[in-house]
Amino acid sequence: MKRLPKQTYTLEFKQEAIRRMEVEGKKQADVARELGIIEQTLHGWRKAHRQGKLAGATSNCKPISEEQMELSRVRAENARLKMEVEILKKATAYFAKEHL
């Protein structure tokens, strides 16, 4: 199985994710799902932010724009919806077998 390359995120992206939790009052799981990142990663960023140790990717990375953040959120939502459709297909096939 091929491993995915490690993702790097800019400081602005991390700060925006933390702002959504602390200022907007969103739950950590919701923000992680919206941005398409793992909840554990978001927890680490929040912990580092509180300790004053939050750092971003190196300067060779471009800043994340609002459009890129929205694209990330839409991709995560699309993946979730595809998974839900697959579950519904399997459930439909299972219940269709019961009625025969």
Image (cartoon, rainbow, N blue to C red):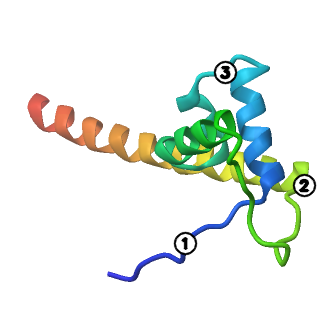
Read off the residue under disc 3.
26
Specify whether 91 is left or right of 58: left
Q: Amino acid at mark 2?
A: Ser
Mark 1 or mark 3: name the one nearer the start of the chain. 1
Picture coordinates of residue 64 (x, y %)?
85, 58
CA separation in Å, label 1 and label 3: 26 Å
CA separation in Å, label 3 and label 2: 20 Å
Q: Could you say whether the residue bearing mark 3 is in a helix, strand or loop?
A: loop
Read off the residue under disc 2.
65
Picture coordinates of residue 88 (x, y %)?
36, 37
Classify 10 Å Cα crowding around label 1: few (below 14), some (14-19), many (20 and above).
few
Mark 2 or mark 1: name the one nearer the start of the chain. 1
Question: Where is residue 44, by image quadrant?
Answer: top right
Q: Amino acid at mark 1?
A: Lys
Q: Quadrant of the C terminus?
A: top left
Which tag is nearer the camera, tag 2 or tag 1?
1
Read off the residue under disc 1.
6
State the residue in front, 63 or 68.
63
